[in-house]
């Protein structure tokens, strides 16, 4: 793996059968206990979509230059980026010039997701699925619904992933929501409106 996180260290050092410490396998507690995904459109030096999955209290993250597709024949490049804190799921605003990731961010889509990854007919936990580079999830977003696969296609310095829509009822080769549904699902605003209202420069 090209990435490490504090939570991965935590898990590697502990046997959940032998310690009463929380394993985090069920995600955060309270409310809807399904984990969430969020896709943030980010107009930084280059426009991209940050695809994030809640895994054990943090948001595992990939930058998707072209954004997600609803067409199963489209393979979208997804570059791994650093884990983000869970609270990042609500962030919408302007990162000032000179700061890392400077530019405007909107919450393009969000909702619960299910991990449906299997190997040899057995369910695979999200951390293992990410370690193995083969993740299958079902999104319950406002714009995106149904299955998506995330597959790692390079290792080490060349680590990169593909984000691919599964062939199911959520698939639609004609929809192109990245182009036709640009508004924030949180506030209804576009990137331009957020940039204007929050004083950022574009
Ligand atoms: Mn970004």
Image (cartoon, rainbow, N blue to C red):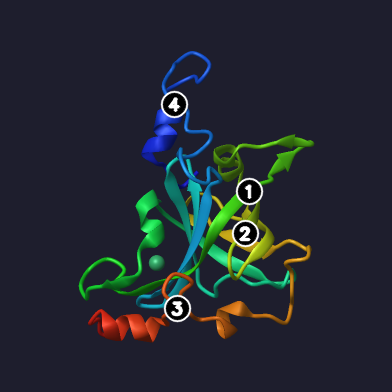
**Residue 113: percent from the left, percent from the top?**
59, 52
Between 5 and 109, the one nearer to me in the picture? 109
Q: CA distance from mark 3 to mark 2?
A: 18 Å
Disc number lying in front (4 or 2): 2
Q: Quadrant of residue 42?
A: bottom left
- Which element is circle 4 on? loop
Task: Residue 188: give its label.
Answer: 3
Q: CA distance from mark 3 to mark 1?
A: 26 Å
Between 157 and 17, the one nearer to me in the picture? 17
| Label 3: few (<14), some (14–19) or many (≥20) C-alpha neighbours in 10 Å | some
Between 165 and 146, the one nearer to me in the picture? 146
Q: CA distance from mark 4 to mark 3?
A: 37 Å
Disc number lying in front (3 or 1): 3
Mark earlier in primary sequence (3, 2): 2
Task: Residue 114: give its label.
Answer: 1
Q: CA distance from mark 4 to mark 2?
A: 27 Å
CB of mark 4 within 8 Å of CB of mark 1? no
CB of mark 2 within 8 Å of CB of mark 1? yes
Residue matched to label 2: 140
């Amino acid at each position: 793996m090209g990435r490490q996180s504090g939570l991965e260290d935590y898990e590697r050092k502990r046997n959940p059968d032998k310690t009463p410490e929380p394993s985090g396998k069920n995600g955060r507690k309270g409310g809807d206990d399904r984990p969430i995904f969020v896709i943030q459109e980010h107009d930084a030096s280059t426009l991209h979509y940050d695809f994030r999955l809640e895994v054990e209290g943090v948001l595992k993250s990939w930058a998707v230059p072209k954004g997600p597709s609803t067409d199963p024949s489209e393979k979208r490049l997804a570059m791994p980026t650093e884990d983000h804190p869970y609270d990042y799921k609500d962030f919408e605003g302007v990162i000032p010039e000179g700061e890392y990731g400077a530019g405007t961010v909107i919450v393009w889509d969000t909702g619960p997701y299910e991990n449906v990854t299997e190997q040899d007919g057995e369910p695979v936990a999200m951390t293992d699925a990410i370690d193995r580079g083969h993740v299958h999830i079902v999104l319950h977003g406002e714009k995106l619904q149904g299955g998506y696969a995330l597959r790692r296609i390079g290792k080490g310095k060349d680590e990169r992933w593909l984000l691919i829509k599964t062939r199911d009822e959520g698939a639609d080769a004609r929809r192109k929501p990245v182009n036709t549904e640009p508004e924030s699902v949180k506030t209804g605003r576009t990137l331009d409106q957020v940039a204007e209202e929050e004083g950022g420069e574009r």
